[in-house]
Every structure is written in C-alpha cells, then in structure tokens.
Amino acid sequence: MCNGRNTFTVSRTIEGTLYNCYKAGCNLAGVKNTSVSVQDVLSKRAAKKKEGAFVLPSYVVSKRKELDDWAITNSLVGVNLLYDIKEERVVFPVLHDRIMVDATGRATNKYTQPKWKRYGSSSYAYTVGEGDIAVVVEDCISAAVITKQVRGCVGVALMGTSLLPEHMRQLQKFKTIFVALDPDAAKKTLQFTSMLRAQLSPSSVIAVKLEDDLKYARKNDIVNIQTRIGECNGIGATTHVDGQSVL
C-alpha cells in the first residue's frame, strides 16, 4: 500500500494473523481471523512446552566496545543492553517475570536491514524502569530514554503501532498510563487512549502530544511528561533526574 521496504510484519497467534506496517505515516494494520479448535490450542501449547525457554543466538553478547560507545552516544549508560556481533545490532532484552522471553535488536548502521529485528515470537512489549506509571511508546530506545529522563516511570515499547491483548495484560498493573507515540501516529495515540480507558481501570489514561520522537529527548517533550506526571501525583510539578524542579 505505501511502497515501503522492510517495514511489514506478520505474526500468527491464537487471536489470528496479525499484520502491521511500521513505516512512518502508514496505518496498515489489523487481524485476519482464523478458526481455531480446542485441539489446535492444545497442540500449540504442547509444542511450545517442547520448544523450551527462549534462547538468544550465541553471537549476542553482553560485553562489547561498540555497545558501550552506542550507549554513551545515546545517553543510555546503565540500561540493560546486549550486542549482536554478527549483524551489528544493539539488543534490548524483553523480560517477563524477570525471565528473558524475547529480544529485539536495532541496527547500528544503515546497511543492516531490517532496521529492527525480533529474535523470538512472543507478543510481549519491551519494558524498562520501575514504578507504577507507564509511558507507552513505539520503540525500545524511546522507552529507555524516558526512564532515564524522568524518575518513577516505566517505559513500555509496543515495538510498532499495534496494541495487542498481551500489551493490555502487561499494562493492567499500572496506576497511571501515558500514551506517547511518535508525532506521526497522533491518531493511534488517541485511539489507544480510548481503548485503554475502556478496557482497563487505572486511575487515569492520558494522551501526550509530542513535538518529536521521545528517543531524541527534546526538552519540551520531557518537560511536558514530567509536568503531567506531577499533576497526576497532585503536586503540580515533578523532578527531573538532574534534580531540577519543573513547573
């Protein structure tokens, strides 16, 4: 539809065949329903148990100079990151109950395609940080950046612009949810906010209008989220990681 290249993803789940294009400005996404019998579900569950736990390829390592340099350049020192030596990717581990269930890698050069790669087949979102406030974003870098910039929040990366049932279950535990997708997905931001308000029961779900992608940490966007968090906490302001108060 959009003539994009290496931006179309398809995954098969019990809900159906999920498809999504993550090219900026393209809204192609959906679910093709398929009939699933009880036996299909039991067979899939048995196969999954037989497969065992998710394991990363041996060429994904935890120590590498290229990884350290990338973390410094992107102000993400201290974030749990790995490195794919073979494909030159920074790898973000996807954890569930503190166990790695998947991972996603970001190419560090323009020659490696596709830019983002999922190593497993789970539908879990990437989460980083600690707290009862979730900031829902599109990609892992944005999720990591927001937790480095603002205390007390958890970055939740959908790794695309589709809100899956598993994402909903992950977001149930948060008191407040901010939806802060990239500016070119403003309609999706409003759509997801409405869906979360209807299906979950946090104290508040708030749509955030951004000037730029959160991974670039523009001051106005960070201050906007800091202030909104402060308002939700009833103090009218919050504190930046450098200790400065934001009015």
Image (cartoon, rainbow, N blue to C red):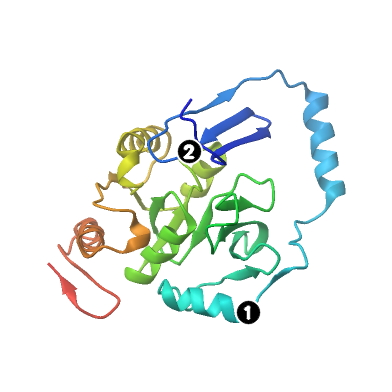
Q: Which residue reaches farthest front?
A: 111
Q: Are marks 1 and 2 in contact (CB under 8 Å)?
A: no
Q: Earlier in the sequence, mark 1 or mark 2?
A: 1
Please provide percent x and percent y for residue 148.
Answer: 38, 71
- For residue 151, say whether it is visible: no
Q: Secondary structure at mark 1?
A: loop
Residue at 57% from the left image edge and 70% from the top image edge: 81
Residue type highlighted by circle 1: Arg
Residue drawn at point x = 14 percent, y = 62 percent? 236
Taking the image as shown, residue 230 lies to the left or right of residue 147, namely left
Establish if 128 lies above or below 138: below
Left or right of residue 42: residue 13: left
Mark 1, mark 2: which one is toward the viewer? Answer: 1
200 above or below 33? below
On the image, the x and y values in percent for residue 97 come to 62, 60
Instruction: Name the residue beneath numbered marker 2.
Output: 163
Which one is nearer the viewer's eye here, 31 or 108?
Answer: 108
Q: Quadrant of residue 89?
A: bottom right
Badge 1: few (under 14), some or many (20 or more) residues near its Cα, within 10 Å?
A: few
Q: Toward the viewer: 126 or 36?
A: 126
Residue under label 1, please give it: 64
